[in-house]
Image (cartoon, rainbow, N blue to C red):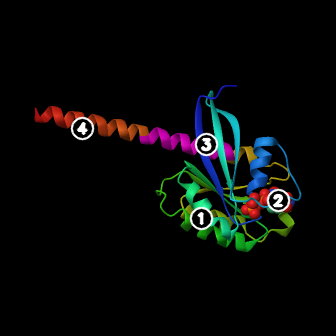
Amino acid sequence: MEHQLIIKLILLGDSGVGKTSLTKKFALNDFEENSISTIGVDYAKKNIEINGIIIQLNIMDTSGQERYQSISKSVIRNAEGIIFVFDITNEDTFQGIKKWLMTSFDIKENFPKILVGNKLDLEEKRKVDKERANEFSSKENMEYFEASAKNGSNVEIIFKEIARLILANQKKEEENKNFNLNSNKKGKKDKC
Ligand code: GTP
């Protein structure tokens, strides 16, 4: 299927939360128990359909390791949306989201972003309450989802949701541009 649109998104979060695993599950329907830590950034592509339009998702899967942070920072600029990921069985990774939000501090408040608590299949080891994650997420203007790269639950949903937010944002920006263009034209006419 030939794509009609391309959108670019990035996954950010501490090392080991499952960014690569979510990406692989979504793009290749594959899961590895012993996934190797990402070096710098990896790229993946997948076509999806939203409202009858074929969209190619270009996914930037970054490393959560401290030493690659400058690479993550530099690729954030190319992204049109962010999926922040933590591991529901690891409190530190939830706290780490604040750091990742700061890493991307220069994004606008209404920039498309969502929060994902991964490893939902490990419910019995949960350390981060859903309510707490939801509360934090809405304070930061994000929707919150829980997913499992291992059993695939909600994986498709999170990528479709970020794509939907990016498309809505693009539409809004286009409308603003047209509005400003028309206002300028009108201003010039009034002067004449
Ligand atoms: P970095 O590349 O170091 O930033 O890590 P990452 O966030 O990409 O994590 P990765 O996908 O490499 O996963 C780390 C480990 O968690 C691997 O052993 C995965 O198999 C495991 N894992 C990832 N997602 C899940 C999940 O949903 N459930 C379970 N049980 N394990 C998972």
In this view, which residue lies farthest toward the left?
Answer: 192
| Residue drawn at 61 percent across, 30 percent down | 51
Q: Is residue 2 visible?
A: yes
Element under disc 4: helix
Q: Residues within 10 Å of mark 4 (few under 14, many from 20)?
A: few
Q: Which residues are magenta?
A: 159-173
Which residue type does callout 2 highlight?
A: Ile
Q: Are marks 4 and 3 in contact (CB under 8 Å)?
A: no
Q: Mark 4 vs mark 2: give the one in front.
A: 2
Which residue type does callout 1 highlight?
A: Ser
Q: Earlier in the sequence, mark 3 or mark 2?
A: 2
* As drawn, 21 above or below 14: above
Q: Earlier in the sequence, mark 4 or mark 1?
A: 1
Element under disc 1: helix
Which residue type does callout 3 highlight?
A: Ala
Which residue type does callout 4 highlight?
A: Asn
Q: Position of residue 173 (x, y in %)?
A: 43, 42
Which residue is labeled 4 in the image? 184
- Which numbered circle lies on residue 70? 1
| Residue drawn at 68 percent across, 65 percent down | 131
- Which numbered circle lies on residue 36? 2
Q: Residues within 10 Å of mark 3 (few under 14, many from 20)?
A: many
